[in-house]
Image (spheres, helix red, strand yellow):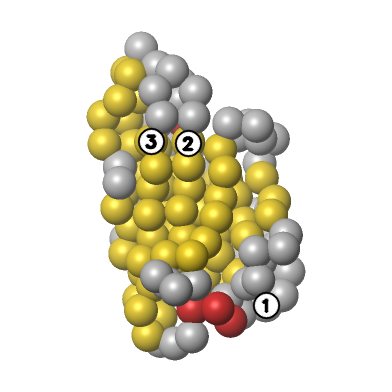
Amino acid sequence: QVQLVESGGGLVQTGDSLRLSCAASGRTFSNYVMYWFRQAPGKEREFVAAISSDSSRTRYADSVKGRFTISRDSAKNTVYLQMNSLSPEDTAVYYCAADSRPYLFGSARAAYDYWGQGTQVTVSS
């Protein structure tokens, strides 16, 4: 089992930055590809970013490319999502997920192994 706990969400203004964290416990963190997803009110959950187990590969949704950066710290068993130039369209609950398959899926519809509970990000205009 892997337990994932997100933190760092909050209320910010347009143009601000925010860094989300996802702390993992349980099985070996370094074995998992890590993901960030988000779900806005009334919308389906969508893929945001992914990072391979060794940090050599990343993948981003087009909507966040150039603004968001995913990274991981194996010593801290934590994955981060640095979000810059935030806009109201980024308002959502952000979730992290872990998956043991060595692929960087770009869809929220894949069956990922573990999910966190989410952290709310609200961007005011």
What residue lies at 57% left-to-right and 43% top-to-bottom?
69
* As drawn, 14 above or below 62: above
What residue lies at 30% left-to-right and 25% top-to-bottom?
12
What residue lies at 26% left-to-right and 36% top-to-bottom?
10
For badge 2, the amino acid type reads: Met
Q: Which residue is mark 1?
A: 101
Separation of disc 2 and disc 3 at Cα? Answer: 5 Å
Q: Residue 119 in the image: x percent, y percent? A: 31, 49
Q: Residue at the front extreme? A: 75
Neighbourhood count class around disc 3 (C-alpha, 10 Å): few under 14, some 14–19, many 20 upward: some
In the rendered view, does 47 fall on the left or right side of 40?
right
Residue 46 can be seen, yes or no: yes
Quadrant of image for the N terminus: bottom left
Mark 2 vs mark 1, foreground winner is 2
Q: Residue at the left extreme? A: 11
For badge 1, the amino acid type reads: Arg
* As drawn, 77 above or below 40: below
Check contact, mark 2 vs mark 3: CB within 8 A: yes
Residue 36 badge: none
What residue lies at 33% left-to-right and 19% top-to-bottom?
13
